[in-house]
Amino acid sequence: MVRMVTRPRLPLMALMLAAVMAGSGSLAGPVSAAALEFDTMPWIGLAAQLVGPITPSAISKGTDGRLTVLLVGSDWRPSLAGTGERTDAMMVMTINNSRQISIVSVPRDVGNFPIAPGTIFKPKVNGLFKYFKQTSNGDRNAALEKMRKAFAYALRIQIDYVAYIRFTGLERLVKEVAGVPTTVAYNIYDSKINDERTSQPVGAKFMQSASTLMRGSDAPQCYTMAKPINWDTVPNCTRALLYVRSRHGPGNNDWRRARRQQGFVFAAIRRVIARGSGTNLQSLRSEALSNTTDFYTTLPTDWGSVLALYNMLNSATMPNQAVFKPRKYAVNVPGTSKQQLKLDAVRALTKAWFGPLN
């Protein structure tokens, strides 16, 4: 056994990676159109729907009959330029013909990760992208393709495409859709997270709410007022990037963050769907296609495929969520801060949720 030690972007899938930047904020259920913003020019949306059949989708569901995507969130930002990047959020998401979404997250501290027959990646899996990039002569796209194959092997499922986003990309896309209404399932008091846009002391709080509009780069600053922190004087944070990154404070950890990210992914899908398939969707597509570093996906980006994905996700539900955490899906590796997956338990779940459709 060997042990290792050390097409353009699609806007809809890129926005779904909003959660991936680093719980349950899930908004499972059909889209509530009345609660969200509609397309301001519905006749253009209707025309786009009519064009759909004329421009066939290039999306492939593989031989299992379902669309499955590896979502990868990078911690890259300008202040870390030149130091590499970690993928602290890694999710696999699938949708069946009944528009039911299943999503699983592999925590960043998982180690001894099987990536090919007879080959494991011994360090923490959030360094796998950096490793693949180094072994691909710095080619990001090749590294992400290797990640897709590695995750497909480890989970024993088909993964059709990969989508990748950076912190800066998340901020831009969330701003483009005028924020994402999000269920905040519990209060979060994070004394360590940093809003790098301010010189105020670190820390932010997110208050429980049925619907908080999480915003992009235009969000108000999130900070504490002094130390020791008087949380009563701290403003409620509504910055999406910090919400999906937060992992400190009472009752908060990496695993709750991962589930919170899953909920935000689904909330972002609902936001895009509710804004319509006309000018708003066209604008979102253009914003993603305008940047070659913040976003990347192997999903086809032609307009017919964008509409096909939009229609596939319209009225979708998300009944199945899981984070591969101890004790059910992983065990702690003695003497380290790593966990190792219980592959039998993990693969039993993925077989049920990601298996071929009849």
Image: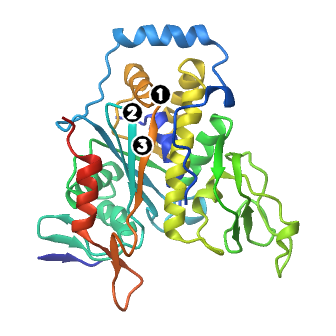
Would you place residue 38 above or below residue 202 in this image? above
Q: Which residue is mark 2?
A: 99
| Discs 3, 1 touching: Cβ within 8 Å | no
Image quarter where the N terminus lies is bottom left
Q: Which residue is mark 1?
A: 314
Give me the disc on residue 296.
3
Residue at the location (69% across, 52% down)? 239
User: In the rendered structure, are the residues bearing label 1 and label 2 in contact, judged by CB atoms less than 8 Å apart?
Assistant: yes
Instruction: Please tell me how crowded label 1 is: few (under 14), some (14-19), or many (20+) other residues with Cα within 10 Å.
Output: some
The alpha-carbon separation of the residues under discs 3 and 2 comes to 24 Å
State yes or no: discs 3 and 2 in contact (Cβ < 8 Å).
no
SS of the residue at dot 1?
A: loop
Residue 132 in percent (x, y) is at: 29, 62
Task: Please name the colour scheme applied to the rendered image.
Answer: rainbow
Say what amino acid the circle numbered 3 marks: Tyr
Q: Earlier in the sequence, mark 3 or mark 2?
A: 2
Tell me which label, 1 or 2, sits earlier in the chain: 2
For residue 136, above or below residue 10: below
On residue 248, the disc is none
> Residue 164: image x %, image y %?
42, 48
